[in-house]
Image (tube, rainbow, N blue to C red):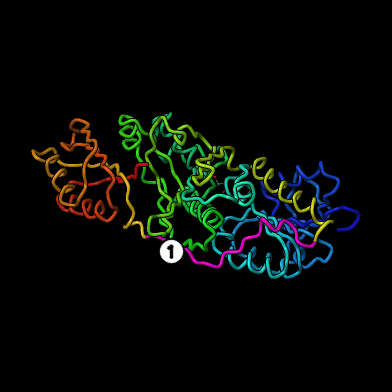
Amino acid sequence: MENNVLKIGIIGLGVVGTGVVKALSKFDNIKILKAAVRNKNKKREIDVQYITDDPFEIANDPEIDVVVEVAGGVDPCLDVLKTAIKNKKHIVTANKELLAKFGDEIFSLANENNVTVLYEAAVAGGIPIIGPIKTTLRGNEFNKVMGILNGTTNYILTKMEEDGVSYLECLKDAQKLGYAEADPTNDVEGFDTMFKIAILSNIVFHKKIDYKKIYREGITKITQDDIKCAKELGYKIKLIGLAQKLENDELDIRVHPVLVEENSMLAKISNAINTVQLEGAPVGSVMFTGPGAGEGPTASSVVGDILAIAAEISYTDTILPSTRVKTDVQAKQADILNTKNSYFLAINAQNARGTIGTIGSVCAENNINLQSILQKGIKEDNTALIVVITETSYEKDIQNAVKKLNEQNIKVTNLIRVI
Ligand code: HSE
C-alpha cells in the first residue's frame, strides 16, 4: 500500500458492485484502480477510471492490494480468486456459492499465501454475522444456528399470508420489485439459503461442510391452503436454514419451510428481512436481524471488510488473523431420515367413513402420536382437506406413514416440519 491508499480491483459492477463504488467514494484512503465486467460498453451510473472485461487483469495487477469480488457464480470467480491469492492479494467477496462449494480450497490457499479472505456480505447481506461469530462470540460453544437467510422467499411467503394470493402471483410481484430474478430457482428452491447455512455451519462448528449433503426443499409447493390452515392452528410458514449439533455429535443441517408459532421471534421477520439466531454457551441465545439483500445493505458489508483490511495493512503482514478459517475436520452430517421433528401434514382424502381413523392408525403403526387434527368441511368434489400436526417423531417414520397413507388414497399433499 503506497501513501496510505489501499488499491482495489472490483470484479462485477452489477447492483452490489455499483453500491460498493458509490459507498467507497467517501473514503480517501481507498482507490478503485480497475473494475472487471462482462460488458465493457454498457452505460453505468458510476465512474470507474479503468474497466476491463478480463478479471485476470485484476488478479494479476501488481499494484492492486485487494480484490473485491461481487460478480457471483463459480466460473470464472474460482480461478480468478485463486490467481489473486497466489499473487498475495487479500480478498473481499460476497460469493456464497463459491465459498459453500470451494471455501476449503480458497481458505487453505489464502493461509498458505498469508492473505485474508473476508466475506461478511455472503450471508444475510447487511447483517453483521460472520465477523461477530469469528470475533466477539468466539468464546462460545454453539449447538445451533438457524435463520431466515433469503429475502426473496421471505417476501413471497409474507405476501401469500397477507394478500391471500398464490405462490405464483407473489413470485411475479417479487420479480417486478426486483427481489426475485427472471430465473428464480436459486432463491425459491432454497439453493441460496443452502449456501449460506453451509458457510455459517463451517464457522460456527469449526468443521468442513459438504453442501451436497445438506437436505434442501424450497417454497414452490406451499399453497394458500397450507398458509390458511397453519394460521388457524396458530402458525406462520417461513423458509429456514438450520444447523444443529445432535447428541451423537453429527451435524443436522437443512433448508426447508417450517411452521413457526405466530408469537415467536421468527414469525415476526417479514418481507425481505433476514435473521440469524445462534444458541451457545456461555452466551445463550442471540439473534441478529436486518436487511439481507440489495445494493445498500450488501455494499455496507463489503465496504466494512475493505476498510478492515485498510486499517491494518500498513501495520502488519498478517492481517486479521482471527478472521482466518482453518478447518481440518470434516463434519459428520446427519441424514434427514434420522432427525426428529414435529410435522404438519396437509391431506386430501375422499369423503368416506373412517378416514380420520385410518390416518390415526397409520400414524400409530409408525410410532407417531398426533397433537392436532383439523378437517375443513367437505369440498364440492366430495374430498376433504384434513390437517394434522404430530408430536416429535422420526423423519423415517413420518416418511413411511406418508407412503402408507398415499397407498390408501389418503393423499398427503404437503409435509411441513414444525419448530
Ligand atoms: N437473493 C438473495 C435474497 C440475496 O433474496 O435474499 C443474495 O443472496
The picture places residue 370, in percent across and down from the top left corner, at 22, 41
Farthest residue toward the right?
3
Query: Of residues 296 and 181, which is closer to you in this image?
Result: 296
Q: Which residue is mark 1?
A: 332
Magenta residues?
317-334
Q: Residue at x 65, y 41 (%)?
A: 297
Residue 394 is inside the magenta segment: no
Snapshot quadrant of residue 100: bottom right
Is 329 part of what is drawn in magenta? yes
Q: Secondary structure at mark 1?
A: loop
Q: Is residue 163 above or below residue 4?
A: above
The N terminus lies in quadrant: bottom right
Q: Residue furthest front?
A: 282
Q: Main secondary structure of the magenta part?
A: loop
Q: Position of residue 250 (x, y in %)?
A: 41, 60
Asked if one can make out residue 246 in the rendered structure from this viewpoint, the answer is yes
Q: What is the x, y in percent for residue 412?
A: 24, 46
149 over 203 or under it: above or below: above
- 2 sits left or right of 198 in the view: right
For residue 247, side relative to residue 58 (left or right): left
The image shows residue 277 at horizontal and vertical percentages of 51, 42
